Image: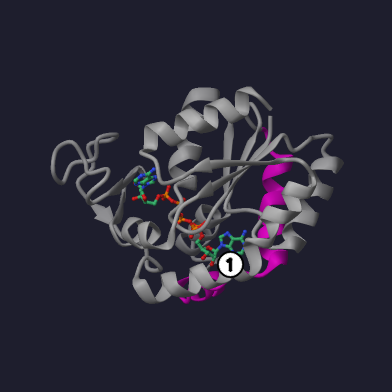
Amino acid sequence: MNIILLGPPGAGKGTQAKILVDERGMTQLSTGDMLREAKTSGSEMGNRAAEVMNRGELVSDDIVVGLIEEKLAAPHGAGFIFDGFPRTLAQADALGDLLARHGETLDAVVEMRVDDAALTRRITGRFTCANCGAVYHDETKPTAKAGVCDVCGGTTFTRRADDNEDALRQRLMEYYKKTSPLIGYYHAKGALRVVDGLAPIDAVAGAIRKVLDNS
Ligand code: AP5
């Protein structure tokens, strides 16, 4: 089963993708994570992409489609979760072509609906374990013991360079202008399923579970 998690920055796509990986052995393909890894590796593409990301703008379609193409060809688990991809109509068309070429289908597009005020609170409160990448939130998902990662025991945490109000304003603008047309695109294909992304993390996971079990 292959699915897309579609939603604005902070909708909870990464959080829910990790739950699906644990529960169903699916493979998460996050273009945001791939671009941040390219930056950490010091590649020229990674450094150029980081400048664009820090401004809250979208990286070019060619680069992200290329990243996804490489992953589709590699060994993978029980289906793909596309997290943060596609983000433009051109990327959606490219994904359709790539899946067809690999003999794969798209089984559901889960739109996670969250309002802008909640997104701002989520983004400005997010922090990540520098060692294992586990994602937390100052208010809604703090570590069980202050300053210690629940997953790996790490004690160093980071905040993303684009998780500030200025960059978020631009990220939201990009979402509404370039990504939200995908809602109509996938609705027309009969693939769109909507969940309430404002609900608590476990409730959203339950709603997604239901969607996947009925797709
Ligand atoms: P990317 O890394 O994809 O960021 P994003 O789409 O802005 O999404 P986020 O990772 O910020 O949020 P999320 O929905 O995963 O939320 P999370 O689960 O972490 O992209 C970054 C940049 O890379 C882009 O701006 C662009 O420049 C570039 N890029 C990436 N893909 C691209 C593409 N395809 N094309 C072009 N450019 C691309 O949750 C957020 C917080 O909320 C966490 O603290 C979490 O604990 C908390 N939380 C989650 N769910 C809940 C809940 N239900 N209730 C309360 N709190 C919750």
Which residue lies at the image location 54% right of the left edge and 53% below the top edge? 7
Q: Nearer the viewer, residue 99 or 42?
A: 99
161 part of magenta stretch: no
Crowding at dot 1, Cα within 10 Å, few <14 / some 14-19 / many 20+, comes out as few
Which residue lies at the image location 49% right of the left edge and 64% below the top edge? 39
- Image coordinates of residue 99 in percent, x first then y, are 79, 42
Observer able to see residue 143? yes
- Image coordinates of residue 128 in percent, x first then y, are 32, 51
Where is 50 relative to 203, above or below? below
Q: Nearer the viewer, residue 15 or 103?
A: 15
Where is 62 relative to 148, above or below? below
Quadrant into which the C terminus falls: top right
How many numbered markers are drawn? Answer: 1
Q: Does ligand 1 reach within 8 Å of label 1's beta carbon?
A: no
Q: Amino acid at mark 1?
A: Tyr
Extreme residue in the left direction: 146
Q: Locate residue 48: give its quadrant.
A: bottom right
57 part of magenta stretch: yes
Left or right of 141, for residue 64 = right
Q: Locate residue 67: give its quadrant.
A: bottom right
Q: Nearer the viewer, residue 34 or 201?
A: 201
Observer able to see residue 50? no
- Image coordinates of residue 11 in percent, x first then y, are 46, 51
Magenta stretch, main secondary structure, is helix
Query: Magenta residues?
Result: 48-75
Which residue lies at the image location 46% right of the left edge and 32% below the top edge? 205
Determine which residue is flagged by label 1: 176
Where is 42 relative to 204, above or below? below
Q: State the colouring used for the structure image.
A: one colour
Left or right of 64, for residue 103 = right
